[in-house]
Every structure is written in C-alpha cells, then in structure tokens.
Image (spheres, rainbow, N blue to C red):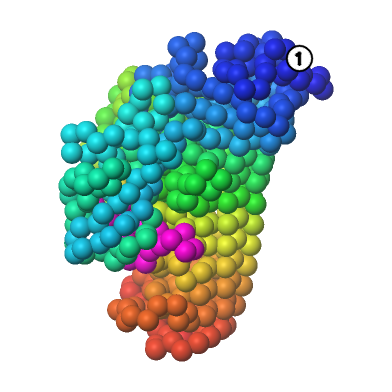
Amino acid sequence: MKAVRLSEYGILPSTDITLKLFSLFEENKEDTEFIFENADYYFSPCDAQRVDFRISNSDVIPLRTLAVFLKNMKNCTLRGNGARLWLAGQMQVFTLDHCENVKLEGFTVNWKKPLVAEGRVMSKNGSEIDVFVDPELFPHRFENENIEFDTGNDEWYTFVKHIIVFEPNYLRTRRDVSDVAIKNITKIGDSLYRMSINGNADIRTGDLINMRHNARIHAGIFTEKCSDITIENVTFYSSGGLGCLSQFCHNMTYRGVHFLADKHLGRLVSSGRDDGMHITCNSGTVTITECTFHALMDDPINVHGCCVTSDEVIDDRTLRCKYRHHQACGFLYWAEAGDEISFISRDTMESIGTSRVISYTLEDHMTFILKFDKSLPKEILEKASIGNSLALDNLTHTASFICTKNRFGSCRARGVLISTPKPVRICDNYFESSGSAILVAGDSNYWFESGECHDVEISRNVFTDTCLSSIYQFCDGIISISPVVPKPDMNKPFHKNIKITDNIFDTVGVPVLCAFSCADLDFSNNKIFKSESISYEIEHKPAIKISYCNNANISNNNWIGNFDLIELSENNCQNTNSDI
C-alpha cells in the first residue's frame, strides 16, 4: 500500500484543504494510505463539491455540500493521527460513494460555531424560565421574537422552540421533562431570555437546556453503495443532522465512534442535532462497538429498512410504488435487478409473498416503477389495486446487527431501534436512555421503517434507573417490542424469537418489558433491582406487559428490593410460561 503524507503534497495544517484533498483522492483511487498530522485542518463550502445525494431520514434538497469526498475508492485508509477537522456552516463531513474496503481512523470533528446550542436556566417562576445563552460559545441574535444562531458563512438558523432539559450535576435528562414546548420568547438582558413554556414542567434553576436549530440536511459520515467500510476512533463534537448514515451498503463497522459535547470549549449538552447512527437498507453485517452517545437530540442507533406502498397495477408484472415519508424518498438504489421483495398486508403486517425485481425506475422523488421477473399472484395484484392496502419491503437490503460494549448516555428518546429480519445481538452495553433503552419496532403505516425481527439476543446489558424517565413514542417499557400492527392476530405475530437474558435492570417501578405481537419471547435469568433514586410516588404499572404474544417464557428472574407489586399483565396471549 502506498503511503501519501498530506504535507508532502502541499496539504498543510491550519489551512483550508477542501479542494486540494479531493484532488489528491482523485489521483490515488486504490491501495493508498493517506496520512494526516495531529493538527488542525479546515473545510469550507464550495460549489465544486455540491453533489446530489438522496439521504435517508433527512430533508430533501437538490445538492449536499461535502467536505471530505471519497468516490470509487478501493483498499484505502485515511489515518488521522488525531487530526482535528474544523468545518464552517452546513457541510457533510465525510462522504463515501461506491467505495470498497476503506477505513477512516483517528479524527475529531468540530465547528467553531456549533450546529446545536445550549442555555442555562437562571431562574424559574411558574411557567416562565429565564435562560442565559453564552454568546461566545453559541453566537446568536434576537430577531422576530426568536433566537437565531450563527453557524458560520453567514448562515443563521432559527431556534425551533422545543427544549430538552438536563440536570447540571450528572448531565442527564431531567426525569419527566421531555420535548418542552416554548410558547414565546422575550429578551430581558444581554443574552438573557424569558421563555414561556407549556405547562409547569419540572425545570429548576441551574438546569441546562438543549436548543435545536438549523436543518437535517447533512450527515456527519455518509456512506452509500459501499462495502467493507470501517470507521474507527472518530469523535464528533457537533453535527448538523444524522451523525453516521449508511444506506445501501454491505458490511459496515463502527468502532470507537463518539458523539459528545466539547467540554474543553465549555459546551456541556450540545453534540448532535439528530440520531447518532442511522443504518438504512444495508446488507451483510453492521457492527457498532465501543462507541459513546451523549446529549444527542434523537435516537443513538436506528437500524431499519424502508417500506413503500403500491396501489396501482400497470400490468401483472409491474407496479407503480410510492415512498410514504417525506424524509425517506427518491433513492437511487431502493431496488436493483435480482433483489427479493416482500409483499406485506398493511393491516395485519403479514407477508403474503415475495418476488424478484428485474428493474427499478425512479419517476420522481415520491414514485417509482417496479418490474418483476414473473407474474404476481392474484392476491397481491388485488391488494395493489386497492388504496393503502399493500406495502413492499426489500429483503435483500437487510443486515445482521451486532451492538456491543457501547455506552448509551443520556440523550433524547430511545437508545437502540431495530427493525431487521437478520440476526441481532445487543450485548454488554450500558444504557441511560431517557426513553426505552431498546425498541424493537417495524411498521408500514407511520414511519415506514420496515423490518420484522426473527432472531434477537439481548443479554449482559446494564439498564440504569434513568431509562424510561420520559415517555416518547412507542416507549412502553425499558425494553419495548412495539411494531405498528393495526389488526394484530396472536396466531400471526410480527416479531419472533426474541431472547432477553442475563441482563441487569435498575428500575424505579416503570415496566421492564412491554411486548406486543411477538412469538417465542424469552425473558429469563435477569436481575431486576428496585431503585430508590426518586422519592415521589409513580403510578403503578405492571412490571411486564405482553399482548398478542404466544409462547412467551417469563421465568427465573431475580427481583431484588422493595417492589410494591411484581405483576405480569397479559392480553390476548397464549402458551405463556411465567413464575410471576
């Protein structure tokens, strides 16, 4: 492998290297190690690196602005040696397009003017809080009765008037305070603002608030149609959208990737604007290990497919299909010749058959035409001719998932979301999630993040008493198995073979497990401790709640502490084995 030291090619620290770096990659496409120095490098938006990418679960815009851009590269390494990458304004930090066996290692990513802001509560009076926003750390102005933040390059973004509240000592989200809406804002002093909130949330003097602004248009690391990619020892101190987004890739490894606030600069609860890692329509194996997530404004990890619908039959082998979510549409690679497609009845979420694609033709951002290798069965054609009845999922673009040795610090919403039929292993992790720590999801009716789970192991994890301290969508238990199935049938459960064993739970009394539409569920050999960390009374809820499940085993768990009542709630279940 050829070693290319950036400094020997005139790419020097403390300078803007955006275009020079791209030219260097173009001249060295294969078998090259690119060596950075342990120094500062700068990137700024330029017209030459604005490219059309259709990015999953992000806002649709014509072009994305790229910093480090690798295209059609093979057997290459970017060795950072601790290099600090500084960006200005809205930019996608790393973009890998059709690359093979590429490794990124040893970088930190930051903005002088960060893409998420924070404030400190100076006082609270009823439904009003007075908040100080440091103008040095988070440059801003007050315009049109709202706060606007400067992110560089004369880009100003408006505060969205929703806050997440962190207590100041341990920097965890405050219990029962999630997504607090701000009704109005007035300026009452230098960088001091009076905010009127909805209700009387438990916000206290000294609390820190996370203030989301800008738009979800760029990822930190974006990979598309790549294979055998490794991201290792990369720290993000800020990001303007999803942290790491991988779509239509094969075999992805993230090791030692950290999303943190830059405490060295005085930031405490401002890291990423949205999800940490979004894994959309991948194949092979996705491995996420030894990573850290703190103060993100959405879920740390989400692994899923992308469901579409069809209600138009062109002929007995051809359907016109629709993307259904405005932030997941217009993909160039949703299907390719030879891909296996599952047809799903949207009411029961039951698969009613599969077929192979011979062509995928994108008509516009929301519609495309699928042609299959043989005539489709009558049942599928009938459903495809009825509005809102038939969903389609690409089974070829589904990945196995290994999630080990990660620390899920206090962030907004859930910890890990999974929706994939391939084997899933979530083991040896530490959870402080404000919502459910693990959500086994899947739907073709709301988010259209598809994928029934067939083989899930959740073991040797620690779930702290901060888990499920606030209620978000689908957060019914510390572990929540909650697919969107409009017409459930206990004889046709959506998820299957989920084993939750040898974990440690510390709970104030919230449900440990809530499972819906699942077969062959095993919850055993876990240790559940009763936490005394809060003194107020909480509404009693059953420790475990299952509905529309069959063949559930709930036994040999060790309940430790002063539980008022250990109760199993069942609804429309059969063949349950329980010692509760």
SS under mark 1: helix
**Residue 34 location, x and y as percent?**
73, 23
Question: Looking at the image, which is closer to me, 138 or 341?
Answer: 138
Q: Amino acid at mark 1?
A: Glu
- Residue 170 magenta-drawn? yes
Q: Which residue is mark 1?
A: 8
Question: Looking at the image, which is closer to me, 205 or 43?
Answer: 205
**Residue 536 location, x and y as percent?**
33, 80
Question: Looking at the image, which is closer to me, 186 or 55?
Answer: 186
- Looking at the image, is 556 positioned above or below residue 522? below
Query: Which residue is rendered at x = 29% and y = 34% of the image?
Result: 141
- Looking at the image, is 169 positioned above or below residue 505? above
In the figure, is residue 512 to the left or right of 324?
A: right
In the figure, is residue 5 to the left or right of 546?
A: right
Q: Residue furthest front?
A: 190
In the figure, is residue 39 to the left or right of 528?
A: right
Q: Which residues are magenta?
A: 163-181
Q: Can residue 564 be seen from the camera position used here?
A: yes
**Residue 276 location, x and y as percent?**
49, 45
**Residue 41 location, x and y as percent?**
61, 25
Pointer 1: residues within 10 angstroms few (<14), some, or many (20+)? few
